[in-house]
Image (tube, helix red, strand yellow):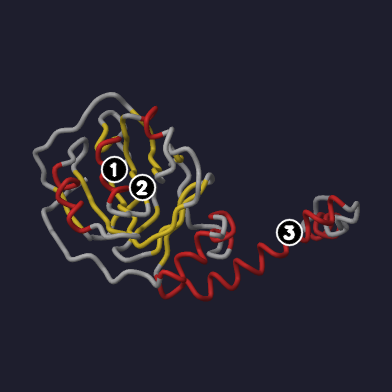
Amino acid sequence: MIVGNRRNPSAVQADPAIVEALRALPAAILSDNMGGLVGTSNLRPFHRGGRMAGTAVTVRVRHGDNLVLHRALDYVRRGDVLVVDGGGVTDQAVTGKIMLTYLESIGAAGIVIDGAVRGADAIGQRDFPCFARGSTPRGPYKTGPGEINVPVSIDGMEVMPGDIVVGDGDGVVAFAQAAAPSLIERARAQAAKEEDGVRAIREGRWDRSWISPLEEKLGLK
């Protein structure tokens, strides 16, 4: 992975009302409404629990190095999610409980790392959202270089500076701010439909009659 030394201003933040609406929607349903093709597969939450939503401040670090990550803290505002492209490397952590404590203190919405954290036991006792690929006791270098607010790849998912990032127990999704209003509308409709399905199961009226016709159509019956 080639890492430069660009430093770009943080993008305009998403409307707080839009962010709050997205925080209430499951990442899986949001992914479904983006063709089921958007979202991480190998990142997991390290925090105690709770949903995350906010505006992306992106960082690309050299494998196992967090110098630029410390500088990037100057670019993070209340409601932002710090999104770190560590190349998926987990043999050295690029952040841990100290940096997360600082992010929480300034009102950041969370952190996403395609790489490793350390201090996992302490992180797991807190509600501040932290999604990462893994953990290790091995700490980072501080030699640079690194880039701030550039396009990054997180577990194969492209994240642009200013994208909205949403995370829960299933993982993380990201998308452009412009896509949010229609995405919220579609996701709410699907969520309501799924709730109807849950009620139907409880009431003994779940309709599974569609399975046989589909099998016949696909030549499986």
The disc labelled 2 sits on which kind of residue? Val
Say what secondary structure mark 1 lies in: loop
Give the image location of residue 57, x and y in percent: 28, 58
Say what secondary structure mark 3 lies in: helix
Nearest to N terminus: mark 2 or mark 1: 1
The N terminus lies in quadrant: top left
Asked whether 50 or 67 is in front, the reply is 50
Residue density around tag 1, few if under 14, some if 14–19, many if 20 or more, within 10 Å: many
120 up-or-down from 61: above or below = above
Which of the two marks, 3 or 1, is nearer to us in this view?
3
Identify which residue is drawn at 11% across, 54% down: 5
Name the residue at the front extreme: 105
Identify which residue is drawn at 16% across, 64% down: 8
Picture disc at residue 112: 2
Give the image location of residue 51, x and y in percent: 49, 51
Picture disc at residue 137: none
Which residue lies under the disc numbered 3?
195
- Residues at marks 3 and 1, CA–CA distance in whole angstroms: 38 Å
Which residue lies under the disc numbered 1?
87
User: Quarter of the image holding residue 62?
Assistant: top left
The disc labelled 1 sits on which kind of residue? Gly
- Residues at marks 2 and 1, CA–CA distance in whole angstroms: 12 Å
